[in-house]
Image (cartoon, rainbow, N blue to C red):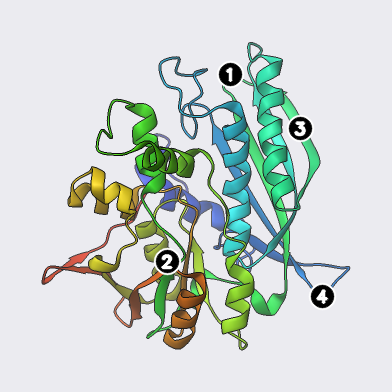
Amino acid sequence: MTQPADLTVADIGEQGLLAKLHSFCSPEIIGDDAAVVGSCTSDHSLAVTTDVFVDGVHFSDGMAQPDVHTTSPEDVGWRAVVANLSDLAAMGAMPLGITVGLSLTGTVPVSWVERLYQGLSDCLQQYQAALWGGDVTRSCVVAISITAIGEVQPQRVIRRQDAKVGDAILVTGEHGASRAGLELLLHPEQGDKLDAFARQKLIKAHQHPKPRFDVLPLLWNVLPQFRVGGMDSSDGLADAIVQICRASGVGAKINAALLPIPAEVSKWVSPEKAKKWTLYGGEDFELVLTLPQTAAEKLQEQLGNPARIIGEITAETDVRILEDNSDLSLSQGFQHWG
């Protein structure tokens, strides 16, 4: 269908744009955190994912916005890799390697690029993945595009569409810490109620997140007959829950009292802001999983705090959050062009 010439991506939003792009893709592959394709050389499938980081949008190190400096070049490299590796973890895949597409203005210092790649390398080494090459090009804005490849046994693939009515919803860690850390970096004068340890913990959550590959072996142990739905929470906890429910054709009820709000955030800001950052802050890179109640309880016990079960999957197709005898609709999280 031909669209009006003046229709923009802002008019249709991220989900509208993705729906159009999906029509060009293989329907059996598209729709999760990564594409899973067969391998010619082993009994594993390949998981492939791509993320783009743009200066002034996804990171601020003072180049595009001289007055804003929240990430060092090493942190930019680390976070760009984690964004991709987290997508692999969300599919149940272990990482193999990445390629990097780097767009640079001519004024970028060589030392900045070297420090960026040091951050990339440090993260890859920690998770036994390799840098396989890539491309460099001239641009009017600095951007890093990473394609990551991992491998997963076909019977252990985690998909958004596999949530079932009655499943527990389990999150593997705290949410809102990254958003709180960003706030401290943007406004250093804030957080006067926090001690140095708490302040550093929140800042580290933003600058140096970790993909949750450690969850996968535990998940395989508690679910011998593997069937689990899920995705990562890079765009926010609320967004992950809504996306899983939408893909599975189900709904959910979330208990607000069980939200994994960091104690440091609760101590610092109002309950309403803490809940908002937890649901919609994004970039916490935890896993949001749906699985049978007994298996969820076992996984929660093995992971320990702050992993927790926060709700359940329902037959209704809306997502509700229950708090103080109220029952409110849970909206989706971060949207590009939103």
Q: Residues within 10 Å of mark 3 (few under 14, many from 20)?
A: few
For mark 4, what is the residue? 43
333 with respect to 208 (left or right): left
Which of disc 3 and disc 2 is earlier in sequence?
Answer: 3
> How many angstroms separate mark 2 from mark 1 (CA)?
45 Å
Q: Residues within 10 Å of mark 1 (few under 14, many from 20)?
A: few
> How many angstroms separate mark 2 from mark 3 (CA)?
42 Å
For mark 3, what is the residue? 135
Dot 4 falls on a residue whose secondary structure is loop
Dot 3 falls on a residue whose secondary structure is strand
Which of disc 1 and disc 4 is earlier in sequence?
Answer: 4
Amino acid type at mark 1: Cys
For mark 2, what is the residue? 305
For mark 1, what is the residue? 140
Asked if marks 2 and 3 touch (Cβ < 8 Å), the reply is: no
> How many angstroms separate mark 2 from mark 4 (CA)?
35 Å
Quadrant where the C terminus sits is top left
Which of disc 1 and disc 3 is earlier in sequence?
Answer: 3
